[in-house]
Amino acid sequence: MSDEADLPPIEPAEITAAPAPASGIVAAPEVVERKGTRGGRGARIEVIGMTKHYDHGGTHVSVLRGVDLVLEPGDMVAVVGASGVGKSTFLQILGTLDLPSTGSIKFDGEELTRMSPSRLAEFRNKKIGFVFQFHHLLPEFTALENVMMPALIQKVPRRTAEKRAADILGRVGLGHRLTHKPSELSGGEQQRVALARAMVLEPELLLADEPTGNLDRHTGEEIHGLFVELNRERGSSLLVVTHNPELAALMPRCLRMVDGGALEPAELNP
């Protein structure tokens, strides 16, 4: 994102890497107040009548037509559907990376479509985490420094940002990879770093677009498990767009998007 390009150089971290864990996923600390899929610190999202169309070369293309959705705080929802029905467009609009043509998006009662671009950027950096099919890590920085980025953008003190980043990297099984750059990590490790980066500020909404699409089955299953565990621990509302039925089946709620963006319940395991 453009916000990252203006950051001052990051000095080498002075945090000692932890030994490699016996398994990829580190046991979570005991969670009391935010256990379960509701009642955490996630946001309530209400989408009403969302549309999105494009006009190109005299052609009017309607991608989304009247999408409605409610996410309660801490909800975990998967959205499946055929390619081209508008899933990624919907996720990008929900994450304020794009604006709807018409309709309403309320985030804990606050209308997002009326915010200025600068206010939207600030809101997005603070409240929303993203995980994409490609990790989008900055190649010149270490795993620790990549995960620190969102905290530094929010002007979190450097030492606090380092601690938060090291803690969440340890949680996803990369406590022994803090000083490694993306080119020195496997594909699964890179995606773990991307997930840690998305979660370092404990966003109220976590959005994931085909987060395991580039991974082998075993690694993808581990990442799937991490999504569910971290959501239950930290309480973010979670929406995952995926073609993977195994990931979708992990979510308590699964919706299918059909042509035009209509969302209907999907039964993956009848």
Image (cartoon, rainbow, N blue to C red):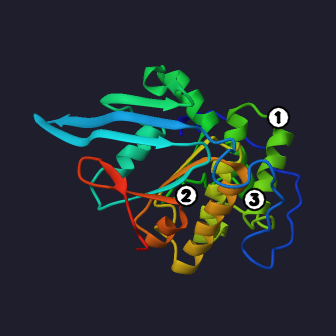
Indicate the secondary structure of the residue bearing disc 3.
helix
Q: Indicate left or right for 114 with 227 as reference.
A: left
Asked if disc 2 and disc 1 are in contact, CB closer than 8 Å, the reply is no
Q: Earlier in the sequence, mark 2 or mark 1?
A: 2
The amino acid marked with disc number 1 is: Pro
Number of numbered discs visible in the structure rendering: 3
Give the residue furthest to the left: 58
Assign the C terminus to one quadrant of the image.
Answer: bottom left
Residue to which mark 3 is pinned: 169
Q: Indicate left or right for 130 with 264 as reference.
A: right
Mark 2 burial class by Cα count in 10 Å: few <14, some 14-19, many 20+: many
Mark 3 burial class by Cα count in 10 Å: few <14, some 14-19, many 20+: many
Assign the N terminus to one quadrant of the image.
Answer: top right
Q: CA distance from mark 1 to mark 3?
A: 18 Å
Q: Nearer the viewer, mark 3 or mark 2?
A: 3
Indicate the secondary structure of the residue bearing disc 2.
loop
Q: Where in the figure is residue 105, as x and y percent of width and height?
A: 44, 31
Q: Earlier in the sequence, mark 1 or mark 3?
A: 1
